[in-house]
Image (tube, rainbow, N blue to C red):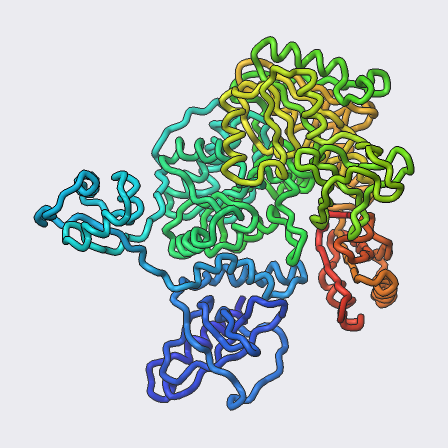
Amino acid sequence: MIRKQTALDSLFSQSGSTDASRDARIRLPVLLPVALDQTYDYLLEAGADVPPPGSFVMVPFGQQSRIGIVWYTSVGEGKAVAEHKMKAIDGVLDVPPLPLISLQFSEWIAKYTLAPLGMVVRMAMSAPAAFDPVKPRMGVVIVPGAPLPSRMSPERARALEVAGDGQIRAKSALAEEAGCSSAVVNGLVAAGQLADVAIPERRFPKPRHDAHEATFGAHQGQAVHLLRAAVEAGTFSATLLDGVTGSGKTEVYFEAVAATLKAGHQALILLPEIALTSQFMARFAKRFGCAPVEWHSALSPPERGRIWRGIATGDARVVIGARSALFLPFVDLGLIVVDEEHDAGFKQDDRVHYQGRDMAVVRASLGKFPVVLASATPSIESHVNARTGRYRHIILPGRYSGVEMPDIKAIDLRSEQPDKGKWLSPTLVTAMIETMAAGRQTLLYLNRRGYAPLTLCRKCGERFQCPQCTAWLVEHRFKHRLNCHHCGFSLPIPEKCPKCQEPGSLIACGPGVERVAEEVAERFPEAKVALLSSDLIPSLTEMRAVIARIEAGECNIIIGTQIVAKGHNFPGLATVGIVDGDLGLAQGADPRAGERTFQLLHQVTGRAGRMAIRGRGFVQTHSPAHPVMAAIISGDREAFLEQEIRTRQIGMLPPYGRLAALVISARDKELAEMAAREIVRCAPGSERIEVLGPAEAPIAVVRGRYRWRILVKASREMDIQGYLRLWMSLIPPVKGDLKLSIDIDPYNFL
């Protein structure tokens, strides 16, 4: 930190007020959002004001002009360039600079993930519209005292009546509200009754910490007190808010947000599925008097730019966002909440590989403010941190409504099989009939999109496989297509087998949610069914509309993938059926498979009976004695955690050990294998670091690229990044079609 501060002081000292200093040309270290790990020096003309670190500048880069960031120290080992060969910056952009802590956070992530710093900073520039000149939006306003036009029509009268309140409106908005054409509005402008004016920039609503006072039970009240105290302490702390489904975790951490607002700071709430949280937004608006600022991929580019600027100026006070919101330019962040902290959606697996939950803790530590991790099924890593005292552990043991947790039963598919060609067992069907008769809802969960995971020819046995990936094509019968869920390849379902040309010979194998929906339609033709799957409901508006209908009780049966496990509160839901409880346990190469399956099944069954009645859950399984199934059915979470933690300790797996994955890929199979073996051959020897592989990846080909995996395993205290940096310095440069990606703390083992 001393070195950086010295460099910062040195940069600013060049902009002194003496004539001698103002005659000197100044070198500015500039970082560009490209896959490089160094800054480039550019010249600032003599006499110009020195832009502070974090400022955005336009600079020549190769044959292009690119946006770069003035860095606060030089990074990397670029060659020294004589001043007469250096290029000058083209100009400083009129954009709020990145705060110094954002620069430090970017450097921390780059060093931890081994990603180029330029690629990390690129995530902080994810709103291109923020860097465009702000164009004033024009509207019209009534001119007080202006005489009426000589020719008055009913349309003009309506327009003047609407505009009579003195508000500035866009011409199109005034025309729509008055029920007339834009030509009528233009005519009134030409006649002098309306005037063209700039519409004031929209401001973000300000949440009020005291807009609504909530009431809490004993456990909730104690949790609220502890979280408020953490905010008021004004220093870094990490808290695990561990409460069963329906225990009121959201309302509890809202009080930490309220304390943050009261102290004058910004707050960030991270959610794994921000696009599905209309109910969450309504609860926020009830507590704070207005909606929060949303940040997710469904926003339009201009809106992303407006929000980015609003956060950088401090106008946006509370942001609800996906993991990428961590890189927004918060000028005064005082709290981060990570809701559903266990969710794998916080892990990014392309370009810069990072775990959003863990990086949220780092961001809070750098900013010296609290972070709250909330979940009904916390990750093993967070559990261990709570047990060892690194995190404060707050437990909410019961539901806020007072209703007991659902009664969970296993349906042993070895002894109770569904009817031939069906997927719902008699016990589950009976429970659904009883639930419908009582006027309540049933949820069927299957974490498999489409109609069937495999299509084959019953005559010749031909199986439909993606031509670009080692994966079967998934049948989507509603769209009448076969799709690859890895690369996006798609083709219409053929009428005959392409190999033997037999017509009508193709059969679907196994169930997806569409096939379950087909069975439900046959068994319950009078039922109103909602199907929740990301590939069937493409737009955010449609998805929120479907969820709203479910909340209102307009659907009898809900069928969904893991979307339904994302914290929804369906008041009328009484019964949950897990169609295939064993599905997630089949991923033998994934050390988190058991944990992830437990979390998903617990979250899904926890949707049942949250309000007035006790819910029921049914898990269809071929392995009812499996530790995960036993824990779900008995409700004994602690027994499962003890066994899982003990397994991790013995195997030196996270959080008791460290993992890194290297994936080598190429379009040529032999080239990928040879490169992988050569990379392993160059690995430095170490008694405490184990290099496993190379081995062909479980999904060996993706998008036409052959993939080989290497796994690096180390004890917790080892500097695995330092080892990898040394290793990478010993291998030949990766060139041409070869690609090498490094994933610290991998979550994907396919």
Left or right position of 161 against 183? left
Q: Is residue 332 visible?
A: no
Displayed quadrant of residue 255: top left
Displayed quadrant of residue 440: top right
In front of the other: 136 or 596:
136
In front of the other: 311 or 334:
311
Residue 683, percent from left and from top: 83, 65
Residue 10, percent from left and from top: 46, 77
Q: Residue at x 19, y 53 (%)?
A: 189
Left or right position of 503 against 354? right
Q: Is residue 198 visible?
A: yes
Q: Is residue 504 above or below residue 107?
A: above
Q: Is residue 265 above or below residue 607?
A: below
Q: Is residue 510 above or below residue 325?
A: above
Left or right position of 232 against 533? left
Residue 565, percent from left and from top: 62, 31
Residue 580, percent from left and from top: 76, 27
Q: Residue at x 59, y 67 (%)?
A: 34
Q: Quadrant of the N terminus?
A: bottom right
Left or right position of 409 against 223? right
In front of the other: 715 or 33:
33
Q: Residue at x 57, y 22 (%)?
A: 398
Q: Is residue 434 above or below residue 405?
A: above
Query: How many numbered badges does the structure rendering display?
Result: 0
View extreme (bottom): residue:
84
